[in-house]
Amino acid sequence: MRKITVFNYVTLDGFFAGPMGEIDWFKSIKKDDEYNKETHDQAKTGGTVLYGRKTYEMMKSYWPTPGARKNDPVMAKVVNNGEKIVFSRNLRSVEEGPNWKNVTLLNEITRENIMAIKKKKGKDITIIGSGSLVRQLTELELIDEYQLLLVPVVIGMGKSFFSNVKQMDLELIEAKSYENGIVKLRYRPV
Amino acid sequence: MRKITVFNYVTLDGFFAGPMGEIDWFKSIKKDDEYNKETHDQAKTGGTVLYGRKTYEMMKSYWPTPGARKNDPVMAKVVNNGEKIVFSRNLRSVEEGPNWKNVTLLNEITRENIMAIKKKKGKDITIIGSGSLVRQLTELELIDEYQLLLVPVVIGMGKSFFSNVKQMDLELIEAKSYENGIVKLRYRPV
């Protein structure tokens, strides 16, 4: 069965976004060649990506553009051609195009929906951003790995993808720090 | 001037305690010889310790007892004889005894109070536990280093010592993981 890995930035006080979804604190992330190369290499491997509606729209507004395709052609190809599943209660359809393919819309986050995706053959599954989706899959105990990029910033209040989940022990798989002060933490639920 | 270092356990979702101050999740911390030796060696070096009232009372109810002194005589000596400063609005006096010495009570957390402590000669200053004190000193920008022991557990809700502080960038000094899954993170405010 395919693994679901969460890939997300979090502040030192545990938030993936400010109270209104703000991610202006991403500006605190300093350029770091080793870090950039590693995350880039990892993303390039492809595989299915799950998105919540907001992150999906952010991706769609950027990666198919000529600017993005010129700026980072390898990554643009991966994102634009790779399998994308977007979860939204309200969207009725998703648009595709020559530079935005392989999109599936699902209106409900249910155990059955997710298990069906996991059971399909293919590369592993990643959730990028999409904090609300992560929280719901955490509650359903369907996340196989959390890959958290701990940014050296405190924002005082915000949204946590563990908010109100019941107590959960995790196992540390890896901790690695980078010159820019980011600490990559990989955990699996016990 | 003496440095103030915070030494505290935090959950992966950023809490030093549950909503009612619960620390039952400390039970998730597995025994680890390397980790225990390091934190023990560090604590043994002594120096002034600042406490909030709750942590102070917890310490006082344990370390002077015959059990604690038998169980860990070196540490008991350090805690019981070392300089302790407790902050409490309500306490009117503090008791000392042959096994509990060098206690100072301060009723107010003010910049002046803290600066006076920092300016006194002596070893560096540590805050152990005492989340509410940490939060107030964070707001006053008087913490020189945060040493956070990230426990591989999620509790869903609780108290954060960064709650409602204004956005703050930090510099990572060290990240080290242990066999028991704890990640020691050391930061200094930028």
Image (spheres, coloured by chain):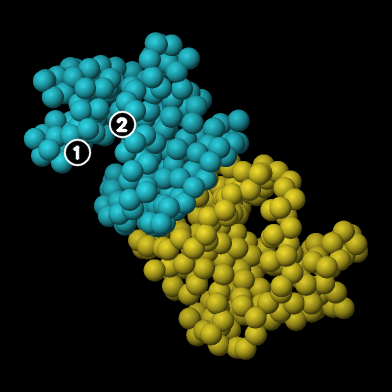
Chain colours: A cyan, B yellow
Cα distance between the residues tagged 1 and 2: 11 Å
Quarter that holds the C terminus of chain A: top right
| Lower position in the chain sequence, tag 1 or tag 2 | 2
The correct choice, above or below, for B126 with respect to A21 in the image is below
At x 26% / y 22%, what residue is drawn?
A: A82
SS at mark 2 in the image: helix
Q: Position of residue B123 (x, y in %)?
A: 65, 81
At x 46% / y 60%, what residue is drawn?
A: B172
Asked if residue A178 lies left or right of residue A70, the reply is: right
The correct choice, above or below, for B163 with respect to B85 in the image is above
Q: Position of residue A162 (x, y in %)?
A: 47, 38
Q: Position of residue B112 (x, y in %)?
A: 50, 85
> Which chain is disc 1 placed on?
A
Q: Which residue is mark 2?
A: A44
Mark 2 closeness class: few <14, some 14–19, many ≥20 residues within 10 Å: some
Asked if residue B19 lies left or right of residue B165, the reply is: right
Name the kind of residue labelled 2 in the image: Lys
At x 71% / y 79%, what residue is drawn?
A: B83
Q: Which residue is mark 1?
A: A72
Image mark for residue B59? none
Instruction: Give the quarter of the image for residue B126.
Output: bottom right
Asked if residue A72 lies left or right of residue B159, the reply is: left
